[in-house]
Amino acid sequence: MQSFTLALTAATVATAMAAPAPQVPAGNPNPDLVTFGVISIASGSKVQNAGWGAMHKGLFTGAKPQEGASCYGPAQDFATFVLNKPEGTLSLLTDGKPWQQLFVDRSGMGQGMMQYTTGAEPAPRNAERDGWAINDEQHLTFGGSDGFLACPAGEADLYRVLPYVGIDSPAGYTNCTSIAARVVVATNPVQCLYSQE
């Protein structure tokens, strides 16, 4: 299981040559890239302090939020993310071959749907890849907001994570819980390739 502590640090990462995603060669720290995990903050809810995982091209929190990941080391219960601060982009920590990068669709069709693409896979027409940051409260933000939703995903205690875009029941999901996304340091970051189906 990946260990998390409540602190933010810069990681030892470098960007792949023409790819937007990072690699992690030893001895090449890059302060523009921040590696971290995320936990949900929603006092009194089932997802309070639950880590975020990546699977099926989306982000999840709660019980078993990550299945089908192929990791270069111990199996991970939670995803590790990399924020490119100058570009405002967010990726999953892979070895860069291929990279996996997040996008959000805030259009009327997407309603805040958040997914990731793999390698050269194109994002949908209305996808936004930039707009990610970490605020002074150590919360992950998208488009200047730290509001996210955890929506029941059809399995017990598993929730799909979506940025809040002003719709309480987005993309067909109901009974969503408002959450914040607390950034936590990944003490032993492990590169994984996350499921793509």
Image (spheres, rainbow, N blue to C red):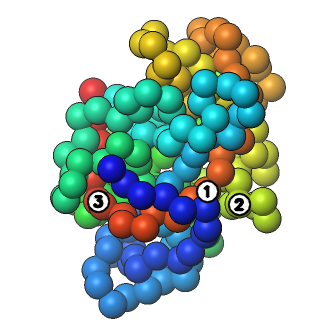
Circle 2: is it few (<14), some (14-19), or many (20+) Cα within 10 Å?
Answer: some
Q: Along the polypeptide, which appears first: circle 2 or circle 1?
A: 2
Label 2 with label 1: CB-CB less than 8 Å: yes
As helix, strand or loop, the secondary structure at mark 3 comes to loop
- The three-letter amino acid code for the residue at tag 3 is Gln
**What residue did someone put label 3 on?**
191
* Most distant residue in the bottom direction: 27
In space, the residues marked 2 and 1 are separated at their CA atoms by 6 Å
Q: Position of residue 149 (x, y in %)?
A: 67, 28
Left or right for 39, reference 42: left
Picture disc at residue 183? 1
| 157 or 112: nearer the viewer | 157
Q: At 65% across and 51% down in the image, what residue appears?
A: 182
**What residue did someone put label 2 on?**
138
* Most distant residue in the front direction: 44
Q: Position of residue 60 (x, y in %)?
A: 48, 32
On the rendered image, what quadrant is the C terminus found in?
top left
Closest to the camera, between mark 1 and mark 3, is 1
Q: Position of residue 191 (x, y in %)?
A: 29, 59
Q: At 25% across and 41% down in the image, what residue appears?
A: 69
Circle 1: is it few (<14), some (14-19), or many (20+) Cα within 10 Å?
Answer: many
In space, the residues marked 1 and 3 are separated at their CA atoms by 18 Å
Q: Position of residue 109 (x, y in %)?
A: 62, 18
Q: At 72% across and 27% down in the image, what residue appears?
A: 44
Labels in figure, total: 3
Q: Is residue 188 above or below residue 41?
A: below
Would you identify the image quadrant in which residue 58 lies?
A: top left
Question: Is residue 120 shown to the viewer in this render?
Answer: no
| 18 or 45: nearer the viewer | 45
- The three-letter amino acid code for the residue at tag 1 is Val
Q: At 32% across and 70% down in the image, what residue appears?
A: 23
Q: Is residue 53 above or below residue 157?
A: below
